[in-house]
Image: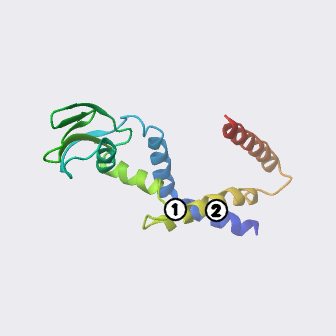
Amino acid sequence: MSKWMRIIHRYLGFFLAGIMAMYAISGSILIFRTTEFLKKERHEIKTLKPGLTEEQLGKELKIKGFKVISTRNETVNFKEGTYNTETGEANYVVKDLPKLLSKMTQIHKATTNSPLYFLNLFFGASLLFFVVSTFWMFAPKTKIFNKGLYFTTGGILLTIILLYV
């Protein structure tokens, strides 16, 4: 059993090296999702239904934290741009991650509505296998295995602390 766990652990690790790097990068980038870190501005002009309310306008433009700053005649001003209530034209700026980074974060945040969500399930199961198979990498009662148990205990304690912070 120990031999097979080590072999599977080794080759699965090589196979998943790319996707593990992608998840590490996108996970780090997602920490900064509420900032403008790495985001580029893109100018948008959309024609919406005229006469939208503030709430409807925010939903149509899909802007988080949407708030109207002022309204003057038929022009509604908001932080990102303007909306004409008579013509329905919205002229605004969107800040997005570059295409590759955006795609990586979309994969990272996949739900069952995403076409490739089963890959995330496979990756999660693979990571769980890495956790379990680690304990078959070295024979029990060896110095390395016992030292590994101390590190495991430390990691579990750190996880518990992080869950309660």
Q: How is the image coloured?
A: rainbow
| Element class at badge 1 | helix
Q: Nearer the viewer, residue 92 or 43?
A: 92
Q: CA distance from mark 1 to mark 2?
A: 18 Å
Residue pointed to by mark 2? 9
Query: Sequence-wise, which precedes: disc 1 or disc 2?
Result: 2
Whole-percent x and y of residue 145?
Answer: 79, 50
Residue, x 76% and y 69% (percent of image)?
1
The C terminus: image quadrant? top right
| Element class at badge 2 | helix
Whole-percent x and y of residue 73?
Answer: 15, 33
Q: Which mark is residue 50?
A: none
Left or right of 49 in this view: 141: right
Residue pointed to by mark 1? 120
Left or right of 1 in this view: 34: left
Q: Quadrant of residue 153?
A: top right
- Farthest residue to the left: give it: 87
